[in-house]
Image (spheres, rainbow, N blue to C red):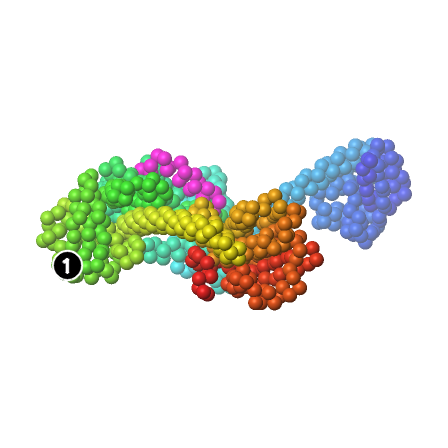
């Protein structure tokens, strides 16, 4: 959309107004015309609705055109102002132009008005655009100045009178720019009295020489506080002479506090340097210079003229394998703004060797985080590293011995010799001996000396000859002597043991291996002394434990071997006993059978055959015992089958009576098996003799079961049953019933006979009991 221009007309004559409107209407621009004729109307328009152009008569009823021009120029110096008048001569036109009029024309030359209006409207529009750009540029500049963390200023190079000051002065020093600029010597007067003279002198000297300069000083704030400033000054030259100064004042109070703390720390470091053996260094990051204290020379063997002052010298001395990792960690610490960092690396000595070192470093930074200085220590940890490597080696040796199963399978002397050899090589010593404390004597059971085995084996020392030494080995597990000739525990051994063997250091470690036997392992150096370190003592103790373990294992194996041999002898003896008992019972049974065959009286024969059956029952049990190789337990189910088989064979009833077995596999103690078997013998014998009276269809069922450790035996036949008064017969009964009763008591069991119309049932119930010993308890009650 085209712009509309607002044009103000100062004219009171109608003819002239019509003439002006006519000329303006010829212009191809959007315009809005307003007519004013008084001073008040003009003031109102300038204040509330400023025009883009003013066309004025030279003479008005309430004011002149020149008065109107002056009013406009006071408020709007660049607003276009054109005179149109028939009375205006050349002299007046010149005066108007000098007062600031843009142009003029007469009514006779009214045709000039249009071009003049277009020109002035264009010029004014360009002016406003430039003014807007300038305003925007100034706004950005002021925003930029305000964002700078410091006071931007400008002053005269000769008088040092400030001409500009950014608003940051209020934040940093408490003074507004207006307060500062109102006093010509404000800056000089507010410099700290102790810094004033040298600060002003420094600034003037460098300004006169045309040199940009930076300096630090203190200023007094509006609150009477002290602020440290760093002033960056640029000298602006004109015609070869200093003209103006541009500068930036930055608050460095916190930095100064940090420097003060640093100075205090440096004093403390000086004290620490004198008290520590560590190398202390300081690295100035800006110059690259690195300084060390004198401990560097003692630690690594360098002379002062061999030590470089730059970072490169230090980097060249770091082991090539460690440098990449070290520099990577250093770069990371600097980029992540860490304040502390630790390194472990190898550093080259003057002789070309390397030492393991541990470095602790503190990084000092500026307020913006930039690292400016690094201070740290270098500690020699080579001894610690060697001990660490030695301890790791000791652990590997002990672990290897502990997991070496082949040692347990070796001859004990060979196994002990191998352990002593490994121990001597690990400790880099010449001699190791194993002694056993046996009462008032110690006996060497194995020794190692420079590759020779058992040169001291069999030697003995007695408590009577060496009472102090025996006191020590009985009461202390470790006796570490770097000089045994001065150690109370070993002085008794000087003439008889130490000197003859050229022993210079002894480490005795002891432990109870088994029972009351005490093992003493002596590690000894020949020809030179040795100060035993803690990890070496621990290693020797572990070797002693390993040796004690091997001896205990050997003792255990020997005892187990003897037990196995003794058990085998007893098993052989018991087998022979059972075999002979069985044979003897067979002889007795055979003799009784011969006697029975010679008897005429049937009653006597029956009694003899009953006894023979009982003897055969007992013989069968002994036969099972020596056949099964078990002398305390018996498979009751198998015994029942064999027993009944033997009894039925004796009575020759295989065809007339059938046996039905329902037997669970049950193993019981022989002390229960024998009485139980005898009871079965009596019950089955009684059934075969009396239950069937020659019947051909006889059946006897035998059931054996166990539930909750209660063993149940049921024997049932389908014979004629017991007589009506069988209970009296049981109470007064024969030897068989008496045996059943007695054996039931022996078993702590319950037994019952039940006579039914189609047979008899016997039941026996007893608790399982694992009684010691072998044999029937019948003899104990008879």
Across and down, in percent, residue 610 comes to 51, 55
Up/down of 731 relative to 715, above or below: below
Q: Which residues are magenta?
A: 317-338
In the image, taking residue 740 as reference, residue 538 lies left or right, namely: left
Question: Would you identify the image quadrant in which residue 527 lies?
Answer: top left
Residue sitting at x 89%, y 39%:
18
Residue sitting at x 66%, y 52%:
718
Q: Which residue is mark 1?
A: 466
Residue sitting at x 53%, y 57%:
603
In the image, taking residue 508 as reference, residue 754 lies left or right, namely: right
Question: Would you identify the image quadrant in which residue 472 lies?
Answer: bottom left
Q: Quadrant of the N terminus?
A: top right
Task: State yes or no: residue 329 in magenta.
Answer: yes
Q: Quadrant of the C terminus?
A: bottom left
Across and down, in percent, residue 392 comes to 34, 44
* 550 vs 701, nearest the viewer: 701
**Badge 1 local density, few (<14 within 10 Å), some, or many (20+)?**
some
* 668 vs 604, nearest the viewer: 604
* 176 vs 588, nearest the viewer: 588
Residue sitting at x 23%, y 60%:
474
Query: Which residue sits furthest front?
Result: 600
Across and down, in percent, residue 548 comes to 30, 51
Task: State yes or no: residue 679 in magenta.
Answer: no
Predominant secondary structure, magenta span: helix
Across and down, in percent, residue 201 comes to 39, 51
Up/down of 123 relative to 394, above or below: above
- Element marked by disc 1: loop
Looking at the image, can residue 229 be seen? no
């Amino acid at each position: 959309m085209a712009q509309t221009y607002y044009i103000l007309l100062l004219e009171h004559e109608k003819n002239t107004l019509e003439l002006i409107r006519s000329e303006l209407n010829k212009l191809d621009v959007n315009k809005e015309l307003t007519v004013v004729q008084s001073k008040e109307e003009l003031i109102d328009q300038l204040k509330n609705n400023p025009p883009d152009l003013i066309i004025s008569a030279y003479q008005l009823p309430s004011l002149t055109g020149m008065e109107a021009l002056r009013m406009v120029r006071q408020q709007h110096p660049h607003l276009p102002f054109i005179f149109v008048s028939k009375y205006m001569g050349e002299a007046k036109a010149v005066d108007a132009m000098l007062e600031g009029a843009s142009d003029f024309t007469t009514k006779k030359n009214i045709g000039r008005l249009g071009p003049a209006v277009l020109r002035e409207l264009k010029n004014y529009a360009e002016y406003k655009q430039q003014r807007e750009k300038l305003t925007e540029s100034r706004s950005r500049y002021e925003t930029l100045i305000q964002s700078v963390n410091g006071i931007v200023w400008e002053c005269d190079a000769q008088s040092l009178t400030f001409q500009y000051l950014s608003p940051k002065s209020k934040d940093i020093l408490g003074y507004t720019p207006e307060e500062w600029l109102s006093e010509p010597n404000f800056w000089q007067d507010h410099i700290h009295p102790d810094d004033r003279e040298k600060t002003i002198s420094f600034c003037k000297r460098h300004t006169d020489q045309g040199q940009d300069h930076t300096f630090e000083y203190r200023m007094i704030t509006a609150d009477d506080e002290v602020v440290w400033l760093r002033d960056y000054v640029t000298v602006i030259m004109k015609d070869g002479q200093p003209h103006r100064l541009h500068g930036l004042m930055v608050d460095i109070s916190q930095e100064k506090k940090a420097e003060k703390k640093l100075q205090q720390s440096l004093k403390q470091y000086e004290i620490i340097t004198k008290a520590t053996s560590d190398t202390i260094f300081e690295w100035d990051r800006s110059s690259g210079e690195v300084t060390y204290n004198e401990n560097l020379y003692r630690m690594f063997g360098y002379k002062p003229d061999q030590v470089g002052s730059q970072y490169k010298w230090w980097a060249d001395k770091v082991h090539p394998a460690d440098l990449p990792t070290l520099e990577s960690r250093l770069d990371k610490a600097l980029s992540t703004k860490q304040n502390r960092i630790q390194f472990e690396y190898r550093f080259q000595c003057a002789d070309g060797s390397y030492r393991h070192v541990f470095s602790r470093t503190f990084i000092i930074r500026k307020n913006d985080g930039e690292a400016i200085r690094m201070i740290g220590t270098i500690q020699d940890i080579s001894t610690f590293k060697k001990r660490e490597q030695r301890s790791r080696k000791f652990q590997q040796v002990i672990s290897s011995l502990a997991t070496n199963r082949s040692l347990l399978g070796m001859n004990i002397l060979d196994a002990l010799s191998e352990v002593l050899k490994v121990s001597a090589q690990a400790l880099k010593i010449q001699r190791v001996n194993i002694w056993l404390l046996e009462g008032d004597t110690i006996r060497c059971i194995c020794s190692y000396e420079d590759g020779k085995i058992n040169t001291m084996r069999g030697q003995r020392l007695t408590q009577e000859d060496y009472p102090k030494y025996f006191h020590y080995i009985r009461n202390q597990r470790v006796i570490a002597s770097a000089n045994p000739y001065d150690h109370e525990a070993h002085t008794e051994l000087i003439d008889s043991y130490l000197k003859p063997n050229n022993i210079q250091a002894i480490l005795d470690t002891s432990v109870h291996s088994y029972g009351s036997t005490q093992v003493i392992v002596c590690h000894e150096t020949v020809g030179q002394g040795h100060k035993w370190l803690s990890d070496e003592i621990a290693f020797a103790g572990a070797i002693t434990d390993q040796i004690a373990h091997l001896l205990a294992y050997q003792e255990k194996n020997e005892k187990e071997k003897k037990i196995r041999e003794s058990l085998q002898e007893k098993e052989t003896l018991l087998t022979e006993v059972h075999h002979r008992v069985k044979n003897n019972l067979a002889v007795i049974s055979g003799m009784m059978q011969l006697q029975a065959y010679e008897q005429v009286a049937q009653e006597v024969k029956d009694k003899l055959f009953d006894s023979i059956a009982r003897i055969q029952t007992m013989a069968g049990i002994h036969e099972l015992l020596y056949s099964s190789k078990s002398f305390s337990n018996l498979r009751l189910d198998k015994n029942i089958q064999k027993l009944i088989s033997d009894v039925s064979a004796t009575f020759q009833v295989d065809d007339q009576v059938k046996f039905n077995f329902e037997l669970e596999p049950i193993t019981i103690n022989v002390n229960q098996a024998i009485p139980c078997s005898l009871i079965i013998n009596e019950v089955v014998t009684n059934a075969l003799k009396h239950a069937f009276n020659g019947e051909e269809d006889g059946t006897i069922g035998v059931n054996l079961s166990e539930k909750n450790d209660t063993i149940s035996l049921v024997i049932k036949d389908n014979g004629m049953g017991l007589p009506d008064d069988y209970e009296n017969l049981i109470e007064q009964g024969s030897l068989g019933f008496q045996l059943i009763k007695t054996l039931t008591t022996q078993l702590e069991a319950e037994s019952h006979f039940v006579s039914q119309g189609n047979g008899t049932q016997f039941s026996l119930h007893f608790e399982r009991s694992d009684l010691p010993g072998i044999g029937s308890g019948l003899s104990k009650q008879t």
